[in-house]
Image: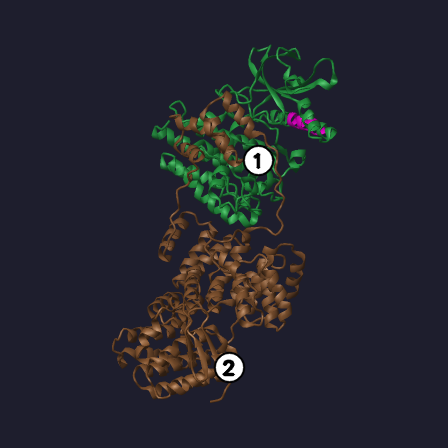
Amino acid sequence: MSHSQTPATRLEGMLLKNKWQVSKKISSGEDGVPGTGGNFSVSYLVENKEDGKVYFLKAFDFMRRLQHTIDAKGNVMADLNTLTSVYQFENMLHQLCDSKRLKRIVRVLDAGDEVLDNNYMHVVPYLILELADHGDIRKYLSTSAEISILAKLQHLKDVALGLIQLHNSSIAHQDIKPSNIMIFSELGAKIGDLGRASLQGQPQIHDAYPIAGDPSYAPPEQIYSYSVNEWFDRRQRCDLYQFGSLITFLFTGSTINTLLKLKLPSDIAPKRWGGTGNSYELSLPHLTQAFEKILTEFDTVNPEWMSKKLKGIVYQCSHPNFKLRGSSKTITMKNPVLGIERFVSDFDLMIKKMKLEGIK
Amino acid sequence: MSVFKKVDRRDLIPIWKHSNEVSSVEFLALKARDQPEIESSYFSELFHDFNHNRTIGVGAELLNIAILTNNISQVSHVANFILNDKNSPLRLKDLARHILDGNAFFPLESVGRLAEDEIRLKRKWLKEHPKDSLSWIDLGRAFVSIGEHESARKSILTGLQLSNHHRWISRVSARFFISINENDIAHKILKKNPNLTSDPWILSAEIAVAKANGRNPQNWKVAKKLTETIQSDFHLTELNSCLASLELLDGNQKKAKSLFINSLKHPNANVLAQAKWAERTSDLKNLVDDDFLKKQKNSNEAKCWACYAECDMKSALKFAMLWQKEEPYTCEPAILSSYLAGLLDDYEQMVNIVEKGLIVEPENETLNLNKYFAEISLAEIKNEPLTVEKFSLVLKFIKNISHSKDKGTIAHAYANSGFIFYKLGDFISGKEWYEKSINMFLSINHPSQVLAEINHLREALISKSPWGESLFENITKKVGRGGLWNDPAIRFYMCKLEKIRRDPSNWRFLLTEDVSNINDEVLVNDNTSRFNLSNKNPTIWVSNKKK
């Protein structure tokens, strides 16, 4: 069966659970679609027959994935087990977020599995999520008049709040990247795609990978395959690194990893970036120096006070030394905490100051 | 002029380069953690998305991912899109240009050519970025090169604290404390490193520092075990060389040879210089392939000694001066360079070299004595009047160091006194002081005795002293008869003196002429010996016949 014929791609026009009318298959790059279809999923728009509102459906394409495994002569049964666990885990995480009323996380409204052709092999598990009417945060990179700096700051504050909510529920997202930050006209920014998230105390398959989320957004310790023992250091500090990178992307157009790669000597840079460096610990002084240098990218941000403030936040969030990630006021405590609340206050202050100065 | 130490021992103390110039090997782990290629389809997904959704945001992310996944050749159209959109941020446009033209994304950084500039730039940087340990270490290096040892110490300790136990930072910090003669602290830094017994770079430095500190290395056995268990020629290069040196000093040439050979399988500049030391101080010859050495970047110390062994003193000086530039934190290269400039009787260069060396270590007695020697020689070459007043500072200095505890230094001072008396026209006193110097060197079996004799001969010939001829005959008999009398410098300088002996009135020209232009073999027959005065391997054949 070819990709176009897999059951997950044939949901258009179907009514699921007598409630969800599948209207249109959509590209992962289209507005409102969180993340990408990278993990073998197909996206649809669905209409709630009860309220008439449009939502987003993420269908897990098990068949395509299994075919891929067969082609690669992999272990099909092991992969099947992985797929079911990933689906169930993501569903469970969303339920957990919902039960805790995590407002800054994209909500899952329903979940189910549809069997096509009356053939249990053609089962399509799916999740139905909120659809972000303003797409993802990448559009806020534009310098056009419609995009206000104020909105950028507000959205970043929402992301920080989302991280606090997740971390307080012992969840680390691990894949914070621009395409996973969804913008809702009335609700602001929310974090989407928990497909790579980690729940403390309940390790999943991707928890064992050196890099759980997207490798291009992974922090240096993961890129150099350095083992970090504590869950807090390994997972929550990874989220913070990616949050700093998100800020950098929104204000400069480059991610922290891109800037680091461009700045590091090639014999220090990790293999993944085309370098020959093989040790996180031994590369750390160079990583630190490169990091300090790339923060000058914020010098192009106006006004100057905001440039300094953002630089300070990114410095605390994305330091290459994972032990130094977190609010400078809280990581030195006996039981260190990341202190993301302080960054929320920083964003609040910046927003207020901008309003006072009449900057949009 | 002087260079020879009582015991020519070179300890394999780490070389301290600017952090920008360090060989990457020192930043590599012994066992590389597997960095598996993790499958990611994100680039192709974004590529596909951009075709459906051509926005600055998606384009920008695609450019970033293309850079990180080494796919920039596929995103020229995206870069053009970004450049043509008036709403693209400025630096994003720079990123697009970088992708299209390969231009550097970051502007070139200012590098201070002079230590003072480097200090100014680093201080300014560190004020804003105080956690950059590499910059603290580089600042320390700049400070020590201008003799600001206290400021250097503060910088080094800050850098060390920020990157505690880091291999390179521990090694160069130890190097710093060796440079300022605080060997105990140097040793402590390395001994406290938790990777001491597992990291051959730390261990080789620790053993070398212990030896420099006059202690017997305690980790010799651990080091031997490491050389057996670690399968990496480049990670073991210094440790093998270090063990080879210990074996050599213990008189085990056979063991030393095999360790030196192992060390040279993937050598760095330090190991090459160490092997050259072994070649010149033992019977281990041809350890280093000189053709290989010539092709090496830097390694100027080793290159200098290779040229020296070939009697190519002009090239030796060139490399010694490059070595001085490479290692501005120590006066060792200045001592060697000034000695070589002295052999070439290039006094202007000698003064210049010594002045730079004295910035690092103002009190260094050898450098001070070499400085006075060069200044007086230069004045005489230029036919400037030499008066007692002119010598007052020198004599005062000589008087002071005559009370030194080190007999070698006293003998050196005596030789300088002899030199001054010759220049003042009091040849008898000059002779007496030189003889006192030679006797004192002899009493402590110091190799510089040979240099004192050669210098005395030069002054005797230039001054046309009646004992010049007998001195010449006496010294000629010793040349090539073992010890330092076999040294290339003696062969080189004696050929010069032979020419002066034949034409003493023309000594100014003959002493300073550029011998590198003399390519023809000029054989001079003498009753007791024959001289080949060519610049290529000048040779003296000594007759065994008694006169």
Magenta stretch encompasses residue A91: yes
The chain containing the residue under callout 2 comes to B
- For the point 34% across and 30% down, the residue is A357
In the image, B533: left or right of A35? left
Chain under callout 1: A
Task: Report the magenta residues as a range.
Answer: A81-92
Query: Which chain is assigned brown?
Result: B
| Mark 1 neighbour class, 10 Å CA radius: few under 14, some 14 to 19, many 20 or more | many
Chain that appears green: A
Which residue corresponds to mark 1?
A215
| Marks 1/2: CA–CA distance | 67 Å
Residue B445, numbered circle: 2
The colour scheme applied to this rendered structure is: by chain
Secondary structure under the numbered disc 1 in the rendered image: helix
| SS assignment at label 2 | loop
Can you tell which quarter of the image residue A14 is in?
top right
Q: In which quarter of the image is the N terminus of chain B?
A: bottom left
